[in-house]
Image (cartoon, rainbow, N blue to C red):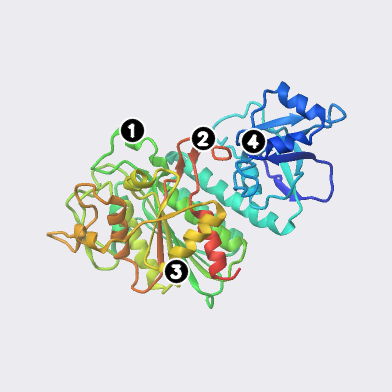
Amino acid sequence: MSNDTPLIQLDRGQPARTIHLTDPAHYDAWLTVQPPRHRAALVAQKFRPVPFAHAILPGDAAEDWSVLGVAVDTENLTPWCLAKLGDVLPEGQYRLAERDTGASTFGWAMGQYRFNRYRKDEAPQGPRILLTAEPSRIAPTLNLVRATTMVRDLVNTPAADMGPAELEAETERLAKAYSATPTVTRGEALATGYPMIHAVGQAATKGREPRLIELEWGDAAHPRVAIIGKGVCFDTGGLDIKASAGMRLMKKDMGGAAHALALAELVMSERLPVRLHLLIPAVENAVSGASFRPGDVLRTRKGLTVENTNTDAEGRLVLGDALIRAGEAKPDLILDFATLTGAARVALGPDLPPLFSNDEVLAEALIEAGRAEGDPVWRMPLWDAYDEMLKSDVADMINAPDGGFAGSITAALFLRRFVPEGTPWAHLDVFAWRPVLKPGRPRGGEAFGIRAAWAMLRARYNA
């Protein structure tokens, strides 16, 4: 965000400009009751009542103006209906005329997101503050804004400045802020306990060594929740090297770790009554003489062996060791986020993350929470018949079948082999990137499924 001013504040009757909301279906009826100066101004602006359009409405004096905004449907406001207004209006304070929009205030704030770490803002604009009459929503909404901003910032940061060490530093920052306990296993210390994490990251240069980053927080008597995020800080593809076009966005391959960090902060900042266990296997899948090779047989923390059929299918390898570590503490629930497969994008596109789960109750809760929060997920099957695609002639399994069929499903089936029997688990295969600009959602790093996951956790643990 451009500054630290809260973009959503309590309405105490302070001076503010008014925002009128309508939609295409109700615009004509709204227009008929407007004063002549409003109708004349809309004609002069050649205004068309299409979603996200807006216009300035004159008042009695030159400075006494208000705003007209057009939503898709004013009866069912989305989190993004105010996003463009939050972006384009002049700095100042605003309030809605018709009714408070609740969750739509999230989009108002996210409309003001900017990633300016590497560029000058030629004309920095002050905050646009929305006043709300719902005080109970302010802090939770601002926490979601902070979480989404964290994901975007971490993913947008180039790999040169966002390696395993930087993910470790971000975890340490959270640990210090919330009196949590961090633990890091790095470099050669991974070779015996976390051999797949070690193998994937062993080619990285000094200072970018692989590591398993952990954080624990909360009362040990509370239900244990493990949140895991894939932290591949750059993915060349390894010796099965990607083409340059495929490598262009691989700074975002730590997007799962960004999601996990942001969700962990939501848990801690709102003091959810759980025992949190955050795990981030952080590596760089680099190319050097030390790179792991196609055909290598890797040992796992579980004791199983994996024939490495593709060094570009490294994310599931590092997650496998992390899942085993999480399961050893007997959690009540495991969630993992990962930019895992291109097949997920072919199936569902960039905006809709596939959800895989071994638990019907957990899956339905995530789907319902996503629908309620405007943060949808789509369940995909853990199709048992495809499990045979993971068979190996020389090891207990392979990491990536040939042919490309059912790529996101076989990746999830691979992960399932490392989930303890009977432990509810959900895996979200997120893209972590928005390729097309939308109101409140600029091109670049993006959070998907995090609001759904947070709403599910709050409901499950009665916060």
Precedes in sequence: disc 1 or disc 3: 1
Residue 87: give its label. 4
Q: Mark 2 points at which residue?
A: 437
Disc 4 marks which amino acid?
Asp
Circle 4 crowding by C-alpha within 10 Å: few under 14, some 14–19, many from 20: many
Q: Quote the CA–CA distance across marks 2 and 1.
A: 20 Å
Callout 1, which amino acid?
Ala
Q: Image quadrant of residue 211?
A: bottom left
> How packed is label 2: few (under 14 Cα within 10 Å), some, or many (20 or more)?
few
Q: What element carries label 3?
A: helix
> Does residue 171 appear anywhere in the picture?
no
Mark 2 and mark 1 lie on one chain; the one further toward the N terminus is 1
| Front: mark 1 or 4 | 4
Side (left or right) of 228 relative to 13: left
| Circle on res. 361 | 3
Q: What element carries label 2?
A: loop
Depth check, mark 2 against mark 1: the one in front is: 2
Of labels 4 and 3, the one closer to you: 3
Say above or below: 92 vs 413. Answer: above
Tell me where residue 5 appears, x and y as whole percent.
Answer: 71, 44
Amino acid at the residue labelled 3: Val
Q: What element carries label 1?
A: helix
Q: Please tell me whether residue 194 is drawn above or below residue 77 in the rendered image.
A: below
Seen at 58% across and 67% down, the residue is: 272
CB atoms of marks 1 and 3 within 8 Å: no
Q: Mark 1 points at which residue?
A: 245
